[in-house]
Image (spheres, coloured by chain):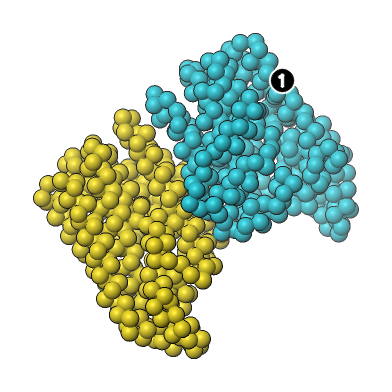
Chain colours: A yellow, B cyan
Amino acid sequence: MLELVETGLAEIKYPERTPGLVRPIAYTLEAGGKRLRPLFVLAACQAVCGDAERALRQALAVEMFHNFTLIHDDVMDNADRRRGRLTVHRRWGAVQAILSGDALLTMATQYVADCDRSVLPEVLDLFNRTAMEVYEGQQLDTEFEKLDRVTVARYIEMIRLKTSVLLGCACRMGALVGGADDVVQQAMYDFGMNLGVAFQLRDDWLDTFGDPAVFGKSIGGDIVNRKKTWLYITACREAHDQMARAYERGTTKGRLVGGVKKIYEQLDLSCRCDALISEYCEKALESLDRACLDAESCDWFADLAHKLSSRAK
Amino acid sequence: MLELVETGLAEIKYPERTPGLVRPIAYTLEAGGKRLRPLFVLAACQAVCGDAERALRQALAVEMFHNFTLIHDDVMDNADRRRGRLTVHRRWGAVQAILSGDALLTMATQYVADCDRSVLPEVLDLFNRTAMEVYEGQQLDTEFEKLDRVTVARYIEMIRLKTSVLLGCACRMGALVGGADDVVQQAMYDFGMNLGVAFQLRDDWLDTFGDPAVFGKSIGGDIVNRKKTWLYITACREAHDQMARAYERGTTKGRLVGGVKKIYEQLDLSCRCDALISEYCEKALESLDRACLDAESCDWFADLAHKLSSRAK
């Protein structure tokens, strides 16, 4: 299925008149990544109708949408690198990143709409509704940067919108195009959505507790940027004064990260975060059960859920 | 019909969770403008089926799309003011302008898709194809800034993509949703498209020859920015050395604009540009004839074409 995705992405037809517009799009799509979202679309479609390819265009659309958000997010975060290469806005400038991102969003919409007429309104509604939620998540993420305190509930809501709904959308999209009924579609959505929360919590965990040699990114970025992750929020609530002191004394990156991690360890946050991840993974598996897939498909999704929840990179 | 548009825009349902995301959208949509594009959608629908309201959602979608491009264009051009108010990125910052613009594009797609299932694939295809062309036009416009020479043909192609196709799309959208056949749809598209070229040429003419008291914008901005309009391109071709000297000697804005306008007058460019505008207006009217609308509708569109081609603001 991964080959289907890669071939499909490589075969995308771009407008020929304006190579400058499409070069950053091809650059972004060819950079790889886990291809989790399109795989979810294909696997869900395969699971409900035995033919993954029926949802190929929608799988590509979801991956294109995801990459559009990365291009614009990197402009907004002023990020230098992504997947080991320069970001689009660092290589071609912010103007080009905005415009090529817009074009990629419209291309994603073209791809998602290339389905059977009978499901087109539902497919579009799912896609557009999800897109709006992703923007809302990005909005909350931006607003949280300026806030002193964020509750855990608000944080979970933010990552649900910013990250998880697109995984839910991917699973539901495959089931929808594959012809599943609404109960199965909703079960698959809930599976992807809960797994998405586990996935993002694991991402945050890795940023602090990951093995730099395996994770591939430098460790402690969230701590340095005071990113309001579950770890940070919980530590501030349970050891407010200690956290304040750690940030006061953390005059170098090494000292700051070391000091904050020490507090996290005192509060046993690594294990407690792991437990929360397992909780969402369990919720995902319960949702998966409700979809009543055949044993093979069910095992595939369950296996992936466990791998993503405990991944080291 | 203008009231339909204004009421429709005022009644848009925004997501409630994230007021920061939607405030810039409402701010932009309420700022007014000519509402030409949604009026074209409604009038074309009215002309072919007698019921303008049938295409209301699509009319709003086209206006939303137009405003999305304005929000992002203003970031890309680093523009300060639009319609007499601060631009979104000047008021809320570039990050917010990018994100709210993205949301507005997705909302436009939601609105355009809210039509009869029987025409949905065609409606979407028209909308997305047009959107891609608009980005291509913006791309060419950006690239022209860095070029020394641009041909008139390339310039016309650029304004066709950046401005005119959306007017063509608006006219065709109304006809399509109103149930017209492909011949009528295409005739209406060609009408809007040719009128769009006339409209943009007139815009360029006004920037140089307009009456500041009536036009509402300051005169000569294109000259100062060496914008490669039809006037500039033609003057550079026919009086290259004189133009170079005018830019050398134009040490103040007043002297520069005065010097360049003098060359334009020697070359009779005001009249010749007017003649070109009339040519495109004529093409638009010929296209309109092919649509075989009833006399009243035909007069309405023809009247508007004449007004837009000779407008003073």
Left or right of B211 in this view: A228 = left
Q: Position of residue B41 (x, y in %)?
A: 57, 27
Q: Position of residue A282 (x, y in %)?
A: 21, 60
State whether residue A303 is above or below residue B57.
below
Quarter occupied by the C terminus of chain B: top right
- Identify which residue is drawn at 56% across, 30% down: B59
Q: Name the amino acid, label 1.
A: Asp
- Identify which residue is drawn at 69% across, 37% down: B33
Depth check, front residue: B168 or B246: B168
State whether residue A280 is above or below residue A114.
below
Residue projecting furthest to the left: A295
- Identify which residue is drawn at 36% across, 52% down: A165
Residue bearing the label numbered 1: B303
Quarter occupied by the N terminus of chain B: top right
- Identify which residue is drawn at 51% across, 86% down: A248
Instruction: Count neighbours of disc 1 (C-alpha within 10 A) and say few if under 14, some if 14 to 19, many if 20 or more.
Output: few
- Image quadrant assignment for residue A258: bottom left
- Image quadrant assignment for residue A306: bottom left
Q: Chain of mark 1?
A: B
SS at circle 1: helix
Q: Position of residue B144 (x, y in %)?
A: 64, 49
In the rendered picture of this protein, how many numbered marks are placed on residues?
1
Residue projecting furthest to the top: B295
Instruction: Tell me if residue B187 can be seen.
Output: no
Q: Position of residue B122 (x, y in %)?
A: 43, 28
Depth check, front residue: A98 or A253: A253
Left or right of A188 in this view: A111 = right
Left or right of A250 in this view: A299 = left
